[in-house]
Structure formats: C-alpha cells, structure tokens
Image (spheres, grey):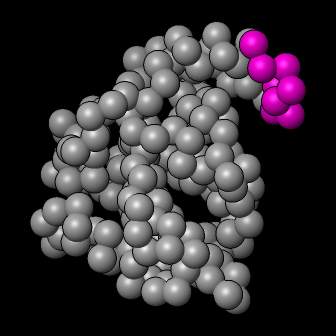
Amino acid sequence: MSTFAAAVGRGKNGWTASELDLTGLADIDEVVDALRDVEPDADVALLFVESDDQYLAILRLDEGEDLRVFGSDSAFAEESRIGSVLLGEIEAPALEIDDLTSSAASSPDDDDEDDRPATDPDADPVGDAELLADLGINSSRLLGLCGKEGMLPSDVTAEICQRIGCGDEMEELREA
C-alpha cells in the first residue's frame, strides 16, 4: 500500500507542516510521539494519513495530549498494518452514513447545504467525526467529504487544510 502521512501543527507563529514516515512505528503511542515532535509547542497538531487513494485517517492532539482519531473507513484497519496501528483501538463507529444523510437533510443552517455530496453507502467511517468541529469542519461536512464519490483522500485533506488555514503549508509539503 502506498501511504502519505503529513502532520500540521498550529503554534505561536501559525501552522507548520511536515511529512512523517510511519513505516517503522510499532504502535499508536509511537505515532503520537512522532506527531508531538513535529511542533512541540503546538496547541493543535493534526496528522493526515492517506493510503492507496482509498483511505484517510486523521489524528488530533490538543496541547500534546488528548488523542482523537477518525478514519474514513474501518476497512483501512483490516487491510493495512499502518491502518491497524492508527485505527485498531477505535471501538465506536462514527455516525452511520444513513445518519449523515438524515442529519444533513435536517440541518438547514449548515452553510454548505448546496455542497452536500452524495455519500458512499459502502464506507464505514470510524472514530471521532467531531474532531475538527472547533476548526470549522463539523461531522456532517467531514463525513460528506470522505463519502463523496470521486473524492480522493488527498482531495479531502486539501479541502480540510484549506478550510482550517494550513492549505498553503500542505500544498508546499506535497510539492517538495
């Protein structure tokens, strides 16, 4: 499986981005340590892990503590060692896709109402879909991006980073 892992951290001087090599990391604690090392003084650190143009995992650390994890599809944990390390300890599924479509229909104050994508009924998102809510990406939007047909994990990452203010840093990292 081809994997791209990029960490962004928001410190006193704004966002920084770094690519991480996860191949030698044995467990989630080592991943968290590597994320913490990217920007040690970050108030928010995010790790985006894209695999095979199919799966996306997002990890979040606040103040270097309190790990929160989201995965676009539980199959990532079953099909990949890295997916298993990142998503293996998640017990609760994220909102079901059916819940997403019904809650999307009942939330008229969502400013992205006209942007709502058709969702992939085969996706099985897991973890904390609210992990980016305070940064402007609510669970409906995150699940919608992950379930949109034709949307690659890199597209989802780019959209999220653009929206939270670190799009340029992520773009520079990809071009390096």
The residue shown at (18%, 70%) is 25
- Outermost residue to the left: 26
The residue shown at (28%, 53%) is 86
Question: Which quadrant is home to the C terminus?
Answer: bottom right
Question: Principal SS element in the magenta part?
Answer: loop
Residue 57 screen position, x and y as percent: 40, 49
Q: Would you place residue 82 above or below residue 119 in this image?
A: below
Residue 125: say if magenta. no
Which of the 4 quarters of the picture holds residue 122? Answer: top left
Is 144 in front, or is 55?
144
The reply to whether residue 1 is in sight is no
Q: Which residues, given as a range, are shown in magenta? A: 106-114
The residue shown at (60%, 35%) is 139
- Left or right relative to 32: residue 117: right
The residue shown at (64%, 70%) is 171
Count the marks.
Answer: 0
Q: Would you place residue 92 above or below residue 17 in this image?
A: above
Residue 155 screen position, x and y as percent: 60, 48
Q: Would you place residue 154 above or below residue 125 in this image?
A: below
Is 131 in front, or is 160?
131
The reply to whether residue 39 is in sight is yes
Residue 17 screen position, x and y as percent: 55, 78
- Left or right relative to 83: residue 59: right
- Left or right relative to 5: residue 167: right
Which of the 4 quarters of the picture holds residue 92? Answer: top left
Residue 34 screen position, x and y as percent: 32, 77
- Left or right relative to 24: residue 161: right
Which of the 4 quarters of the picture holds residue 5? Answer: bottom left
Q: Would you place residue 103 above or below residue 7 in this image?
A: above
